[in-house]
Image (tube, helix red, strand yellow):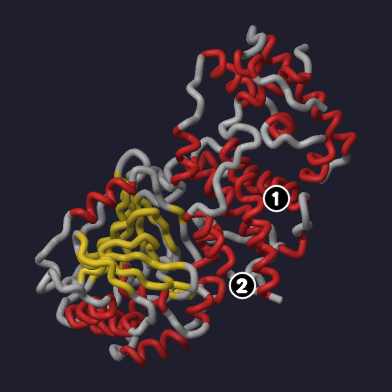
Amino acid sequence: MKNTDEIDAMTRALARVAPGQPGGHPSDAEAQTLLTLITAEDPATAAPQTRPARPRGVRRLPWRAGTVGRRSWLLPMRGMAVAAAVAVAVIVTSMVSPAAVPVAGRDVLLMAAASAEHIPQGTGTYWHITRTWQGPNAPQMQESWTTRDGHRWSRNEPYAAPGAVVKDPAPFRLMGAEIGFEELERLPADPEELKERIAGLPQYDSAMTPADRQGELVSPLITLITELPTPAQVRSAAFEALATTPGIKNAGPVEGGQELLIPLSASLKIRMVVDPEAARVARANILLTAEGGSAMSNSYISVNTEWTDELPQ
Amino acid sequence: MPDERLARFEAVYRETYGQITAYAVRRCDSPQDAADVVAETFTIAWRRMDDLPSGEEATLWLYGVARNVLANHHRSESRRKARSAELDVKMADRYADSPDSGLEREAITQIFRALPDDDRELLALVAWEGLDHKDIATALGLSRNVVRVRLHRARRRFSRALTDAGIRSTPESRLAPAERSL
């Protein structure tokens, strides 16, 4: 038998991170974000057990528990910085006229609110959501198709075989509570009334940021304009209500819209590209999903929504 | 009171983040798994602040939590082959600069991985995290004596498997003599 020292030395040589070395630094951006998300959860309302019950397919607890609850995961990082830099360099000048004049973040949202009213939602059997982001080696895509009566299929969700369209029931959620097509359609088309109504909806503290719990409602408003099949008038109201959020900044025009920074909590900002003409959130670094989760990226997750009659098999 | 709790958690987080990320990265095959383990470990810590010991024992306690998280993770791993790519840039870097694998090293890695889970963890806690018997006993909730006996067996099994495979020692092990032995 080899001696103890030799065995330990051999083991030591296998360490991916050398003994004594840290795996990461608490000052890293992702460490800070993780801390913010974890501590956004009110421990008093959180499940006290070691292994909180997970709804089907849920992973990445803190992200779930932190900002927005339910189904969440942490998205890609490596290689994305380059892609983002490229995207930022491609400034689309036809965006907002005149392109040279800086537009306040608030105004971008108000423009989107104005556009939203006139953009019909389209028709079809399935509400089709597509998320794309840059993976470590290749672009990644995740899709879902939901019928009005709540049947849902998805492709490339965690746990599923890659590429296959599988039945994947998961309700839409706002503030952690389920919300159906009909409820979305009944939401008020006036910004103030919309905020009031949202504040009165069922909600789970653990699925909200502290600011939202105090009535800011930034994350549910963003959820309404990002992935949910929100009717045109309500989308418009949500954009307008969101525009009243203090501290919104416009980092300027980028490909596909204007890059806004919207405070989600004291220490966490969402960076999202809003196309004021199409009244769409084109991409975001923290995506608040229709299923009530949050997905994060050091760069961007692009999102596209449409009604379609086609369900790939 | 909530502020106090937050301040304390932040202090522990800052203090232990480097160690817990290293722990996870050393044991997970992919950066996304490692990011998962780190995130879940600290979430549990936040929820169980009342159980979180102070001082140096906090790290050991977190190793214990991470160990459980990891065990649950591995159990569901086969179901999760096909998930979206998700990773953390800093952790990804760790994987990027994984030492290139010579054949012998590869063989040692294989043998190490084939060891029973508990053996591997004990050997790793000593060699990777630099824990002694007492630390390991605290982290895993075992008596020191049990740790000593199990560690002895683990080393013996690893050694035997290496000998069976015809491996004597690696250049790394010759270059990096043990700084502490138990």
Q: Are marks 1 and 2 in contact (CB under 8 Å)?
A: no
Instruction: Decide if residue B13 is in sight here.
Output: yes
Horizontal side of A39 relative to B126 (left or right) equals left
Image x and y of residue B43, in percent = 61, 59
Check the image and report above or below for A234 versus A170.
below
Q: Kindly state the secondary structure of the residue where label 1 is placed.
A: helix
Extreme top residue here? B166
Parent chain of label 1: B
Q: Amino acid at mark 2?
A: Asp
Q: Quadrant of residue A139?
A: top left
- The N terminus of chain A is located in which quarter? top right
Location of mark 2 (residue): A42
Could you classify mark 2 by the number of other residues whose Cα lies within 10 Å: few (under 14), some (14-19), or many (20 or more)? many
Q: Kindly state the secondary structure of the residue where label 2 is placed.
A: loop
Image x and y of residue A312, in percent = 25, 52
Check the image and report above or below for A45 versus A133.
below
Check the image and report above or below for A95 versus A166.
below
Q: Quadrant of residue B142?
A: top right
Check the image and report above or below for B129 versus A199.
above
Image x and y of residue A98, in percent = 10, 73
Location of mark 1 (residue): B62
Q: Amino acid at mark 1?
A: Leu
The residue at 74%/32% (across/down) is: B126
The residue nearer to you, when weighing B7 against A235, is B7
Whether marks 1 and 2 lie on the same chain: no
The residue nearer to you, when weighing A188 against A56, is A188
Horizontal side of A313 relative to A256 (left or right) equals right
The residue at 50%/78% (across/down) is: A211
| CA distance for labels 1 and 2 | 20 Å
